[in-house]
Image (cartoon, rainbow, N blue to C red):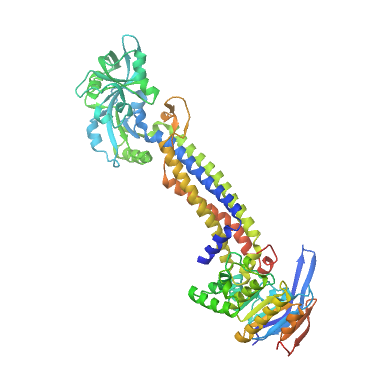
Amino acid sequence: MGTVLKIAWRSIWRNRRRTLISMSAVGVGLVLVILYTGMLNGMLGEAKEQLDNIGMGHVEITAAGWRAHRGAAEAIESPDALVAALALPPRSEVGWRVTARCLVSSARASQGIELEGVDWTREALLSAPIRDVRSGALPAPGDERGILIGEKLADRLKVKVGSKVRVMAQRADGEIGAELYRVRGIFHALSATVSERRAFVSRTSARTLLGLGDAAHQVVIQLDRAADAEPVAAALRARLGPRVEVLSYGDLLPMLRNMEALSDFVVWIAALFIYGLVGLGILNTMLMSVLERTREFGVLRAIGTRPGRVVAQVLGESFWIATLSGAAGLAAGLALTWYYSEHTLMVIARGEAIEYAGSVLRSGVRTRFSPGSALTAAGLVYVMALVTALYPAWKVAKLPPAQALTRGRV
Amino acid sequence: MPVIEVSGLKKEYVDRGQVTTRALRGVELNVEHGEFMAIAGPSGSGKTTLLNMIGALDSATSGTIRVDGRDISGLSQRELSDLRRDRIGFVFQAYNLVPVLTAAENAEYVMELKGVPARERRRRIAALFERMGIGDLMDTRPLKMSGGQQQRVAVARAIASEPALVLADEPTANLDQATGRALVGLMRELNRERGVTFVFSTHDPMVLEQADRVVRLVDGVVQSDERKTGPGA
């Protein structure tokens, strides 16, 4: 095999320009695949990995039927016991909320919102807005009159930190409940909807407002890897039975799931195109190289080289081209995806973020640095290079030596 | 037992499915071990075709060829490759060295196919190159050598793996008179020293003069088979 690779190595440099052009095509193709995959993974990956931008869980548990009516009475009893019984993957975060659709009013305006009664410490792990209070502060523990609202809601109500607001909601017993709150903090959210239509109070306060006992409406689970959402949801569904509804983010945001499937498809189509072009480039190079050296292969066959070794030698040339261009393409692709995972690759919208399929995408697109998928792409280039070289290899190896000796130059 | 036995050998080429060219029309020929034999004849007489048939480079239309008593007509491509590797050396008119290999690597190639260890290959090639007067060309690539030097390397490649038979297709055709004479003299010496059988096609009178035996082909049949004594015998 040493001699085969040695001859193959020296042979690819006979026509240096052709080899370099061919290697450039392979390398650039690989870079494009790696960068393109990294970009799509960056966009959608961020959308699904960072559902906390909209305060959503990768998996959510609610009382059966709650999502259809959102009635205050349709709650999970003893959420602490339910959470304690969950078996979740390592590095998962879980919390439970009291949720209600309310009307919030200031002296100047009113707005329909979703009020969430939370445990401040736990919610900070589940909702990005809680971690991004731009003025004022989170209500202190035990502060049952404090409320946290978004920047857009504050604008709309024309309130600031310290202002009073009144919240009205339908209680669990069907009556209308109302509470006065004082704005303690104003948060920033990437999602305009969250900024304008969400407010947080303590869980105790929300329970009081809604006349709810020791119950909650939502158990929210954030996983370390969004990809685990479906199996985790399926396992919880089987374990908890029909009294609760367990949904993954894909169930809650079917458009996002569809876009994931579409982007996977688009990546495959683009990869197929690029690999196809790479393959044709290698095929062209190898065909030209082999056909103009048919006589040389005839000589090798004449002096006792088996057909299989001739095939190996042609594949060897393809191997070197793929190795050099694949290594260069892999290095450049990894370098670019790493760089653009730290810097903005392109801006797809004005403003900080856009809401997309129920989720939030930052306007500045970054790539996801993924050596695993880059290595897979490089591996596919290898396979493509070897498969496409099989044709010229087979063509020259099956030629009778006497016939091969009458063709081309050595 | 003859090293080569050719019986009733015919070879026809069909050009575009219409014109049939009868290159060999029933050749009968035996070659004994250690012979230094020339196949002579004008262009188109079938010399190269006959050498290709004997060297298992092409298949016959009919007739049989035996190498060391073994009928080669039923052998697979792989078996034919092994036969050429183990029993036959080739010298071509146009040298046909692999340009990306050095002279020594070219000569070692067949030994490497046979699995001879690298150290042993290099030792044998060094000795052979010295014997053939090309010891200083070991690491030179073919394109930097003269035609005569390339043909000496080609002869070295042909005999390095110690085949029973060397087939040389017009080996002096691209060489000047003096270089050609020296090359044939060298092959003659190797024939005597090592007992290697040489069969070469030629229409060069100088080469014919050196041969022990001259088989003349005309229009694909053996017209004469002459064994002689003289300067080359």
Q: Nearer the viewer, residue B183 or A106?
A: B183
Total numbered labels placed on residues in the image: 0
Q: Residue at x 56, y 72 (%)?
A: B138
Q: Is residue A7 visible?
A: yes
Q: Residue at x 48, y 37 (%)?
A: A263
**Residue A314 percent across, percent down from the top left:** 57, 60
Q: Is residue B57 left or right of residue A309?
A: right
Horizontally, residue A288 falls left or right of residue A119, namely right
Q: Nearer the viewer, residue B27 or A220?
A: B27
Q: Quadrant of the C terminus of chain B?
A: bottom right
In the rendered view of the protein, which quadrant contains the N terminus of chain B? bottom right
- Give x and y (percent) for residue B78: 59, 71
Res. A393 image quadrant: bottom right
Image x and y of residue A1, in percent? 51, 66
Q: Nearer the viewer, residue A150 or B123?
A: B123
Picture layout, residue A64 above or below residue B135: above
Q: Residue furthest bottom?
A: B229
Residue at position x 44%, y 31% in the image? A364
Compared to residue A272, the image places residue A399 above or below, namely: below
Determine the image quadrant of residue A358: top left
